[in-house]
Image (tube, coloured by chain):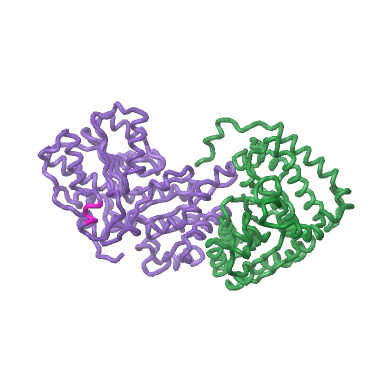
Amino acid sequence: MATIEKIVTPPKSTQRRLMSYRDALAASMREALEVHPHVIIMGQGVDDHKGIFGTTHNLHHEFGSDRVFDVPLAEEATTGIGIGAALNGLYPIQTHIRADFALLAMNQIVNLAAKMRYMFGGRFSVPMLIRMVVGRSWGQGAQHSQSLQSLFAHIPGLTVIMPSHPNCIIESYRHAIADYPNPVISIEHRLMYDLQFDCDLYPAKPVASPFASRLARQGDAVTIVATSIMVLEALRAAEHLKEHAGIECEVIDLHCISHPDRQMVLASLAKTGRLIVADTSWKAFGVSAEVCRWVCESTPGLLHAPAVTLGMAAASCPTAKSLEDRFYPNLGTLTDAVAQLVTGRKDHGVPLPTETSMADVYKKFKGPF
Amino acid sequence: MKNLNEAEALFYQSLRIRLVEERLIDLYPADKIQSPVHLSIGQEAVATGVCATLRPMDLLFSTYRSHAFYLAKGGDLKKMMAELYGKQAGGCGGKAGSMHLAAPEVGFMGSSAVVASSIPHAVGAALASRRLRKNQVIVTVFGDGATEEGVFHESLNFAAKHPVPVLFICENNGLAVHSYQRARQAYDVVELAKVYGLPTTSIAEGYDDLLVSQKMKTIVAQVRETSQPQFVEIKTFRYKEHVGPGEDWDAGYRHRADMARWQAHDPLIQRTDWVARFRASIMAEIDEAVAFAEAAPWPGEEALLTDVI
């Protein structure tokens, strides 16, 4: 069975660099402050002893508390203050230690930040980065676990990314802060913070744009379009299927949810003819629905079999572990879905991985966090 | 018009705003302005008095009832009229209409149609002004209803705690749509602002642009010098309905006698000599702006998807 170490740890013979998701975030925050004097970081707890899970830790000492500062528990005003600061020459980076809390700022994000460029005929732009962290496992429950990418990506004017790898973080944040004149919402996944990644995991060929979708693995049997931590699950499933059934999966990390590389997906489908969408959120009206929409609208004939989607169960997230393990898709359900789709049979005979909880594999911590 | 003293210049600006909006009333039945208008008729002296004390580099954030502030801050009348007509030559290319006027070239930072939503923008702009040493005073203008929103509290708290050079101006006409302030608020708005430690001022004579201007001069200078926030309430009176070109005295929720008491002080009604003196010059400017808007082209199809990202 594929282990997480096989996916994210490089072969010993290479000199590739190991970096954790957390370290990539911390490095991005530091670089932003070093390179751009107009960057400020504002959020609840950015200057406390935990520093947004270690990603802003001690930066206020180094760069000053006028650039890295705590804010009152006032998500709407704080977001509006970021917008106003951006309008008058600063680049604000804002943090929400749970994406759920950003719902309190929806008025500013949806009615103002997203619309100011268009509504005022291009007279204003609102360059800012809003970091939102998705929680999962150890009883995060209904209000600390939501993965809200489709809510934001639905709104014209917002750019929504879901980094799945330190490379994505460093390239995308650098691009957003240095070159991008619009609000960017980055949805980070807490469960990946402690993982060590091989930073040359992706093909050496440079990506078209830091926000572009990425071809994470090449294969010919099925196309798995994945987001965030589901990219890692797809890669693990792919290794398992190669080992046990000789099935080669192509894995596309969608990355920019709001502006995905549709051609990359369609080109892959032209090769595989089979589509699985593995998203971190609910399926209805979400990324799964959206990917299926544009495949159906453009070239439905590419599909040799009905598309398959994986996401959270259509309920709020339960706290009990026995329920939570069933709430999220896992390595087993994803592997089973691929095997069924590729063989066209429910009794495909491919042995499934036995683990049921992603958190048991990924977690290098014990709560609370 | 040249060679006006301070009082005359203020009056001229207030009268100009009123005559522009009265022209909008005349134009409305033709259906050429297909944008909801929230008229400032009765409230002009607030905008004139406040903006006369600001520098072009000072930024002002306003609401959907913003024609008066747009003009008083120096926004171009032709571009405003074209914007209301939905024409490409409008200040925002026709995408904004009446409720989202903007003129960043004169520090008029765009108005929002969601009550209270631009208050924190002013606080953030003031934060940037302080950090980047721009020496700006940042003004946010909002109605009495906006003080009921949570973001008002959040913004005052942040502004006071940091502190930043922002001037909160409550343009208090006593009404939120059709609902009286006393029916909505369990607090006195000025007393509320004091809770945050802000210096406060209340100006009852919101019809008097000269008096408003004189009081604001001191306050604006203090905000600039100290980089500390202040709160000002200016009482005023809305002569027209909440939205639209008409009056709604027949709706039964308010009384003409209240308006008559206010109008007895309104210089734009009482100073008939100055109205007679300035009217022709202003009407010529308005005629030119309307002709400009009428003749301007519509935005083309290519504009539909530009400036989204």
Name the residue rendered at 64%, 63% in the picture: B167
Front one among B190 and A351: B190
Displayed quadrant of residue A154: top left
Give the green chain's letter: B
Q: Is residue B72 left or right of residue A315?
A: right
Q: Is residue A26 left or right of residue B258?
A: left
Give the residues drawn in magenta, as a range: A323-327
Tag count in the figure? Answer: 0
Front one among A166 and B20: B20
In the rendered view, would you say B302 is above or below A66? above
Front one among B261 and A128: B261
| Residue A110 pos. (x, y %) | 48, 49
Q: Is residue B112 left or right of residue B9?
A: left
**Quick check: is A325 in the magenta stretch?**
yes
User: Is residue A83 at least partly visible in the picture?
Assistant: yes
**Quick check: is A344 in the magenta stretch?**
no
In the rendered view, would you say A202 is above or below A27? above
Displayed quadrant of residue A272: top left
Q: Main secondary structure of the magenta part?
A: helix
Name the residue rendered at 68%, 50% in the picture: B241
| Residue B120 pos. (x, y %) | 56, 59
| Residue A45 pos. (x, y %) | 41, 66
User: Is residue A69 at least partly visible in the picture?
Assistant: no
**Rendered-image quadrant of the C terminus of chain A:** bottom left
| Residue B73 pos. (x, y %) | 71, 52
Give the purple chain's letter: A
Q: Is residue A236 left or right of residue A104?
A: left
Name the residue rendered at 26%, 56% in the picture: A195
